Amino acid sequence: MVKVGIVGGTGYTGVELLRLLAQHPQAEVVVITSRSEAGLAVADMYPNLRGHYDGLAFSVPDIKTLGACDVVFFATPHGVAHALAGELLAAGTKVIDLSADFRLQDADEWAKWYGQPHGAPELLDEAVYGLPEVNREQIKKARLIAVPGCYPTATQLGFLPLLEAGLADAAHLIADCKSGVSGAGRGASVGSLYSETSESMKAYAVKGHRHLPEIRQGLRRAAGKDVGLTFVPHLTPMIRGIHSTLYATVVDRSVDLQALFEKRYANEPFVDVMPAGSHPETRSVRGANVCRIAVHRPQDGDLVVVLSVIDNLVKGASGQAVQNMNILFGLDERLGLSHAGMLP
Ligand SMILES: NC(=O)C1=CN([C@@H]2O[C@H](COP(=O)(O)OP(=O)(O)OC[C@H]3O[C@@H](n4cnc5c(N)ncnc54)[C@H](OP(=O)(O)O)[C@@H]3O)[C@@H](O)[C@H]2O)C=CC1
Ligand SMILES: CC(=O)N[C@@H](CCC(=O)OP(=O)(O)O)C(=O)O
């Protein structure tokens, strides 16, 4: 049994970790932290978890109790894992960080986009970017894993087959992405109010979103050269879901793109390449650790349109984090992650 600690149990990704781990046959959550709700029983805060975590209550973060776990997930705002990861690693505890603290390999780049100095640059060399479809072998040996962001997961998985095969004009990639409101977290803010987000839709951060350098870093690795990417996120009136519509110009029209995508993901348990002509829906992955992809070449032209959908809280965060844990501990990668999406 893997002994699990979670720092930040009251945010959306924290409670999603609890929901997924409740069904995991080889993991037991023994510590869950919240400074504001310390002492409260988990089931008193989250009635959906009644009967699953009897006796487990939130506690303040404490290195001793966390350091007694086999693995600690950070479901916290940026900067928290910087402060605590080093001590946990020294105690022999593995760290899976859902925040962006260790996603960018360059500490200066991180400081530029996150508006504060990088708090643990000495750990960057050993941090592994936790996208299993790319880094499975490194994840197996890692001590510190940076779980990719939600937009970066959907966008990279959609572009990878084209870039790895050298088939796209890497200088002109476009990612037009839509997110549900839970992507903004559980903290109260005017922008997340029902009356601000329902019956309306808008783009934001067109000038530059902090996921841009993360996506670019992954695409550069796949292409083996610099890439030019325009990334435009949108807020849409749904609770969960990311829908990435990706555009690239192909340099060779003769290639069977459907076959290329199917081959690339043939052995991936959590990437579903849909039949040619499909239009994946976000609700088909709601609650599921799945990225569902369709590839199109409208009117047989040289512009490829890839549609890629995930649940931002599952394949875009907590599900992917559990997938990483399974790989890290030599377990079946699918354990605890067999939920299908929810229609309607
Ligand atoms: N929402 C999403 O779709 C996605 C989120 N992420 C990332 O996952 C992380 C968690 O996001 P989300 O679940 O939305 O929740 P929040 O970012 O709102 O995190 C809240 C949790 O962190 C705890 N926390 C806050 N500050 C500290 C601190 N200094 N020390 C210890 N604990 C702290 C809070 O508890 P308390 O204050 O009571 O201690 C609370 O449980 C973020 O980095 C987010 O960017 C990644 C991908 C997708
Ligand atoms: C809709 C919405 O606001 N989404 C968030 C991104 C999701 C997120 O949590 O960011 P990390 O993956 O970097 O942690 C945003 O645009 O800031």
Image: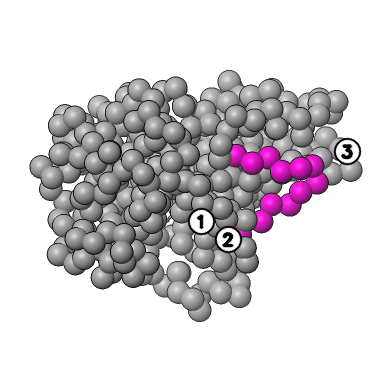
- Pointer 3 and pointer 1: residues touching (CB < 8 Å)? no
Is the residue at mark 3 in contact range of ligand 2, meaning its CB lies under 8 Å from it? no
How would you classify the magenta stretch by its main secondary structure? loop
Q: Report crowding for label 1: few under 14, some 14 to 19, many 20 or more residues within 10 A (C-alpha).
A: many
Q: Is residue 172 left or right of residue 43?
A: right
Give the number of marks. 3
Residue 70 location (% of width, % of height): 23, 36
Q: Which of disc 2 and disc 3 is earlier in sequence?
A: 3
- Pointer 2 and pointer 1: residues touching (CB < 8 Å)? yes
Determine the residue located farthest toward the right in the rendered image.
Answer: 299
Can residue 162 be spotted in the picture? no
Q: Report crowding for label 3: few under 14, some 14 to 19, many 20 or more residues within 10 A (C-alpha).
A: few
The N terminus: image quadrant: top left
Q: Could you say whether the residue bearing mark 1 is in a helix, strand or loop?
A: loop
Q: Quadrant of residue 266?
A: top right
Can you identify the residue that label 3 sits on?
300
Identity of the residue drawn at 63% across and 66% down? 344
The magenta-colored residue range is 271-283
